[in-house]
Image (cartoon, grey):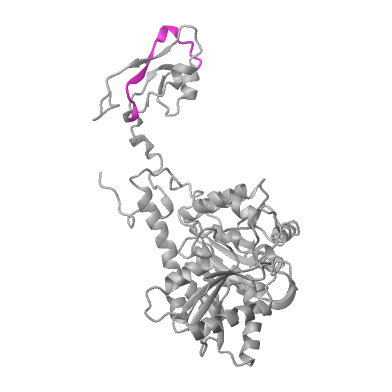
Amino acid sequence: MKKETWRELTIGTINLQAGNSVSNLTGTWRSGRRPEFIEENCIQCFFCWLYCPHFAVHVEEGKVTGFNHDYCTGCGLCAEECPTKEKAIVMVKEEVKLAGGGKK
Amino acid sequence: MSAVKILNGNQTIAEAVRQIDPDVVAAYPITPSTAIVETIAQFKADGLISGEFVCPESEHSAMSVCIGAAAAGGRVMTATCSQGLALMWEMLYIAAGLRLPIVAAIANRALSAPINIHGDHSDTMGARDSGWIQIYSENCQEAYDNFIQAFRIAEHLDVRTPVLVGLDGFIISHSAESVLIEDDIKVRNFIGEFKPVFPLLDTSRKITVGPIDFTDYYFEHKRGQIEGIENSPRIIEEVGREYGQKFGRPYGFFEEYQMEDAETAIVVMSSAAGTGKDAVDELRSEGLRIGLLKPRVFRPFPHEKIAEALKKMKAVAVLDRASSPGAFGAPLFTEIRSALYDYNQRPKIVNYVYGLGGRDINVEHFKEVAAKLRKIAETGKVEETLGYLNLRE
């Protein structure tokens, strides 16, 4: 994407495309590990959803169903905060993909 | 109707605020600017202004409220000084970076330590790279005139940059003078209606204000910000001229006093310039061809115009009411010396720091400087580049 010159930018850092962080795939920041969801251990407490800094916890019909890896940075907060004795979220190793990472 | 009133600097600024009636005033009281805030609060309580008056818990919050209100699309102002301005420091850069036309009255006061409540320029000089336009006043009348013009300058669509107006703490803020307060309607007409640019409260257009920039955009946005203040000299000139046409007191970047045939000159800002002019009068009656140049606009610095005004002098002394520890000289001095660098014909130039923490500067001290300048002009030699006036050695 061609980046604007300073003359082309809107005054005062104003971004006229509000909500365009959707196009910023923060999943590309992930390096080496990602969360894995173990549904049978999940008590649907929504701690992971609450704590996730990137809204990457996927919810369907009021239930946590897994993760959106386009945005998950692999920080591990969800697994850390998961309160069940047998964790419903564990961090697993993944292959680092430098180009197009996070698309999976 | 216009009327001559006996007011001190703080009351004068408050009068201008009453006339302008901004959408939002957010301020936290701090000596010596407290009375500006108190008087505005009284005006609000008495129903004399319709704008919101917000009392946050600190100056940092006061400037934050100003930023939010200005981004929402309001005409906004504040008042502070010294530690208060220092506490606003990070928010000053944000106001400028977001190109919000906030206006601030600053009753210039020394910075701690040691703690001191009296006048010097340490506070605003500390904010000189924050991106704000800086205008300084010699007396109450100038504080009033500058404050009114500040809104027009800040809000101009080519500028959209915050403006601070300095009035020396106590010397101006607390000294009563006769001030011509112009007609309310005329002042309001001069200011005109506020035109917000991309206001957040316009819900028909969703925008983001102040998103994060990484290495890919920060530099471009900063360059855009610089353009605003670079555009401002033309506007400052236009507004100063129009103010003169409407109210009879025109303003430029600086005032020249007895400079036409002067061989030596003293450069000094704000209230001390009044004392300096008295000294020039006395020295002239003794036959000395000396003049005085009083900068009004410090940011943007009118480097070319000041250099043109000073280049033919034999010797120039720049008086700074702030120090810049470890620097080549105090802020005004380094600007002016640098402005003269490109000229083949240029004066010998020296710097005197004066008046820190409100220390008096009298006619005698200006005469001391004049004598040094005379010697430099005669011998062509500078013995010391940086000196201190009225300091116990």
Q: Is residue B148 visible?
A: no
**Residue B342, how many percent across, how many down?**
37, 74
Closer to us: B199 or B123: B123
Residue at the image point whose x is 36% and y is 35% from the top = A22
The question of residue B9 being in magenta is answered with no
Q: Name the image quarter holding residue B355.
A: bottom right
Q: Does B60 appear above or below B7? A: above
Relative to residue B251, is residue B143 drawn left or right? right
Q: Name the image quarter holding residue B114.
A: bottom right
Q: Does B377 appear above or below B391? A: below
Closer to us: A14 or B104: B104
Q: Does B238 appear above or below A12? A: below
Q: Quadrant of the C terminus of chain A?
A: top left
The question of residue A31 being in magenta is answered with yes
Closer to us: B142 or B158: B142
Q: Name the image quarter holding residue A74.
A: top left
> Count of labels shown?
0
**Residue B234, how many percent across, how many down?**
44, 72
Residue, far left = A99
Magenta-tinted stretch: A29-45
**Residue B368, how many percent across, how many down?**
63, 79
Q: Is residue A15 visible?
A: yes
**Residue B227, how many percent across, how many down?**
40, 62
Q: Quadrant of the N terminus of chain A?
A: top left
